[in-house]
Amino acid sequence: MQKIIDGIDQLSERIGKGTSWLTLLLVILVCFDVVTRYILSDTSAWIMELEWHLFSLIFLLGASFAFKHDRHVRVDLFYAKFSQRDKALVNLIGNSIFLIPWCVVIIIYSFNYGMTSFNIRETSPDPGGLPARYIIKFAITFGIILLLLQAIGEALKAYQQWRSPETSKPE
């Protein structure tokens, strides 16, 4: 079980660190767009579309990394006061009942969404926009697959922690 957890964590870590470079690329692209728009009075549809594509990739590919590092949104009203064992149980149940099934549903629908776009060879509706819009649509599927893998890894970690004798001891 630990090999699976470690493999998933390494995958999320590598993709997360790689994705962080997209942030630098996005900043450079936005600066270029601002200079060309306000100094040269020129702009292109492909630049604006590439900006939102990069932002989407940062969000989609970074989600599993954020989840791995517990940097996601959580309502800590009661959770913060729970014992380690109770937190592990909440994480196990939350991942198993809510996150993992949600990921499976999103993967199915987003794959069909991407396939529809691929089958019609969808491009940007804007003149001068980016071709192959299906690539960014398939990125939804890929990002959620990464999140699903990390959710499975986190559920396995929570199970290990819940079963661990150290978490059974009173604090």
Image: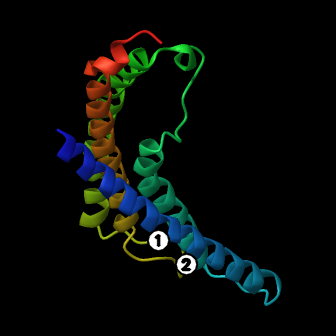
Q: Nearer the viewer, residue 95 or 104?
A: 95
Q: Position of residue 111 (x, y in %)?
A: 27, 52
Q: Position of residue 90 (x, y in %)?
A: 39, 19
- Kindly state the secondary structure of the residue where label 1 is placed: loop
The reply to whether dot 1 and dot 2 touch (C-beta < 8 Å) is yes
The correct choice, above or below, for 146 with respect to 98 in the image is below
Alpha carbons under labels 1 and 2: distance apart = 9 Å
Q: Nearer the viewer, residue 94 or 1?
A: 1
At x 27% / y 65%, what residue is drawn? 118
Residue 52 appears left or right of 4:
right
Number of marks in the rendered image: 2
Under mark 1, the amino acid is: Ser
Residue 20 appears left or right of 68:
right
Q: Quadrant of residue 165?
A: top left
Residue 124: mark in rendering: 1
- Kindly state the secondary structure of the residue where label 2 is placed: helix
Q: Nearer the viewer, residue 131 or 16?
A: 16
Under mark 2, the amino acid is: Trp
Outermost residue toward the top?
A: 170
Q: Position of residue 85 (x, y in %)?
A: 38, 17
Residue 53 appears left or right of 38:
left
Outermost residue toward the right?
A: 39
